[in-house]
Image: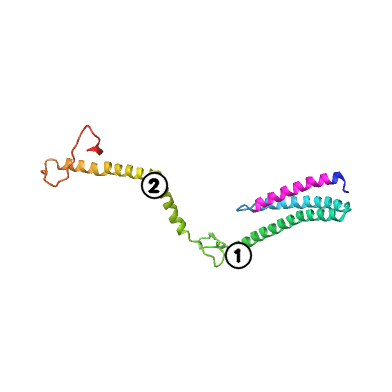
Amino acid sequence: MATEDTLRKRKSVRTAFTKTINSLMEEFEKEVPNGEVVKTKCLTLDRIYNELNDCDDIVLKNIGADEDFDKEYIKIEEYRENLDLIKIKNENFFNKIEEVVKFFNYTLSTDLDGRYMVKLPWTDNSSLPENKNLAEKRPLATTSKLISSGRYQQRLRNDLRKSFREEYLSLVVQQQINEVGSKQVEVGDVVLVVCDNKKRLDW
């Protein structure tokens, strides 16, 4: 059987390996992964895996029963598959960066004023999605929510009162001042009865 020291060491190395794998996966899932961080963590992962591989070799060499060997080998393969997955993601990531740099250099030019211009890296034959339905549903949902809570009607009433008080009443009062004594009240005229003890809204 493998020594206790080797098994103990391998346990710690596996923990470090898994932690580095998870950290790299989190970096790849970001909208804009940091290339320097990816490079550093991949180098760290390679170093950790080499150490893990040495421990695995010692463990496999000291296993006698075939059944135990198979179980151990399958477990070791899981770590190798995780490493392969990271290598594929890493390669795709840097290939994408290389493509962007090539596109930038290929489309870089200057205008008549000497200013640099570069094309946006749009995908060929792509079309932007139409969000008309979403745009229409949002105000309807907001209005429905305001109506159900009663705030919408209250806001409308407040706005109407404010407009009536600030626009219509002030206009009527001003017109009354300008035309005082110039016209006799006749049937059908709209008049405003002033009461000093009440607010304008209640006249």
Instruction: Give the SS element for disc 2.
Output: helix
Query: Horizontally, is 55 left or right of 29 in the view?
Result: right
User: Label 1 neighbourhood size at 10 Å, few (<14), some (14-19), many (20+)?
Assistant: few
The x and y percentages for residue 77 are 78, 56
The x and y percentages for residue 176 are 17, 41
Q: Amino acid at mark 2?
A: Ile
Q: Splitting the image into 4 quarters, where does residue 88 fall?
A: bottom right
Seen as rendered, the residue at the extreme bottom is: 125
The x and y percentages for residue 89 are 68, 57
116 relative to 166, above or below: below
**Chain-order first, disc 2 or disc 1:** 1
Residue at mark 2: 147
Name the residue nearer the viewer: 91 or 147.
Answer: 147
Colouring scheme applied when the structure was drawn = rainbow
Q: Amino acid at mark 1?
A: Tyr
Q: In the rendered structure, does residue 96 fall within the stretch colored magenta?
A: no
Residue range (magenta): 7-28
Which mark's residue is nearer the viewer, 2 or 1? 2
Question: Which residue is located at x 29 percent, y 42 percent?
Answer: 161
Question: Which residue is located at x 39 percent, y 47 percent?
Answer: 147
Query: Horizontally, is 57 left or right of 20 in the view?
Result: right
Name the residue nearer the viewer: 28 or 11.
Answer: 11
The x and y percentages for residue 69 are 84, 54
Instruction: Give the SS element for disc 1.
Output: helix
Quadrant including the C terminus: top left
Q: Which mark is residue 202?
A: none
Q: Which mark is residue 106?
A: 1
Q: In this view of the protein, can residue 29 be seen by the observer?
A: yes
User: Label 2 neighbourhood size at 10 Å, few (<14), some (14-19), many (20+)?
Assistant: few
Query: Horizontally, is 115 left or right of 53 in the view?
Result: left
Question: Which residue is located at x 43 percent, y 49 percent?
Answer: 142
38 relative to 106, above or below: above
